[in-house]
Amino acid sequence: MSSSPVKIVALLVGAATLLGLWLFFAPAKLGGSTTYSITDGISMQPLLYKNDLALVRSQSSYHVGEVVLYESQVLHRPVLHRIILIQDGNYFFKGDNNDFVDPGYATRSELIGALWVHIPEAGAVLGWFGVPTHAGFVAGPAVGVVILAGANAPPRRRRRGRRSAARLRRR
């Protein structure tokens, strides 16, 4: 009985930790606060290389010099570049390795978030799982393990409950 309060506290701490990690690292599309982007190209070298994983977080304000993921209306895709000018609520960008400014500009509503963390080459690993046949190679054995684990489980024994006083008197 004395370990029961300890188990409850441990369970509550574990649940709070998982909730905090979820809110901190969960993708924005699933209610979290982080957007994940795999870099493509050489425009941000030497800071970012192709297949780096960029973790981006939304901010209340953005400043010149920050690396920001924005939805490009010209390229019709997200772009991760550095802010070089903010003028009349319009943000202008340039890749660190480019000798030209990005075409067009972005408004505040088109900014997805500022670079928070980047993990070199992690995008290549995640991209591998994005190929349906590769995902199948991982999912198939995982499903097999789950099914076999359930099949090999020992049968559950039924606990005998207390017999009611009325049943005992009838005997």
Image (cartoon, rainbow, N blue to C red):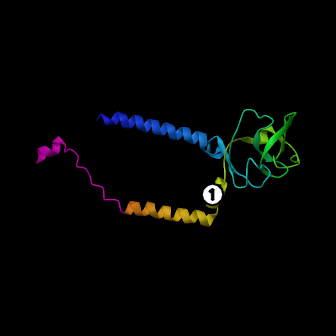
Q: Could you tell me which residue is drawn at 36 percent across and 62 percent down?
A: 152
Q: Position of residue 37 (x, y in %)?
A: 70, 50
Residue closest to the far front: 46
Picture quadrant of residue 9: top left
Q: Main secondary structure of the magenta part?
A: loop
Which quarter of the rendered picture does the N terminus lie within?
top left
User: Does residue 1 appear left or right of residue 148 in this picture?
Assistant: left
The x and y percentages for residue 161 are: 23, 46
Type of amino acid under label 1:
Val
In the shown orientation, is residue 13 left or right of residue 83?
left
Q: Does dot 1 land on a helix, a strand or a loop?
A: helix
Judge from the rendering whether residue 16 lies leftward or rightward of residue 76; answer left or right. Answer: left
Q: Examine the structure image and report whether residue 163 is included in the region drawn in magenta.
A: yes
Q: Is residue 126 above or below residue 118?
A: below
Seen in the image, is 123 located left or right of residue 111? left
Q: Which residues are magenta?
A: 152-171
Q: Residue at x 75, y 55 (%)?
A: 40
Residue 97 at x, y percent in the picture: 82, 49
Q: Is residue 141 above or below residue 90?
A: below
Q: Which residue does the image show at 22% across and 49% down from the upper left?
A: 160
Taking depth in this image into account, of 168 and 162 the one nearest to the observer is 162
10 Å crowding of disc 1: few (<14), some (14-19), many (20+): few
Please give the residue where the numbered disc 1 appears in the rendered image.
125
- How many numbered marks does the figure carry? 1
Residue 167 lies in the magenta-colored region: yes
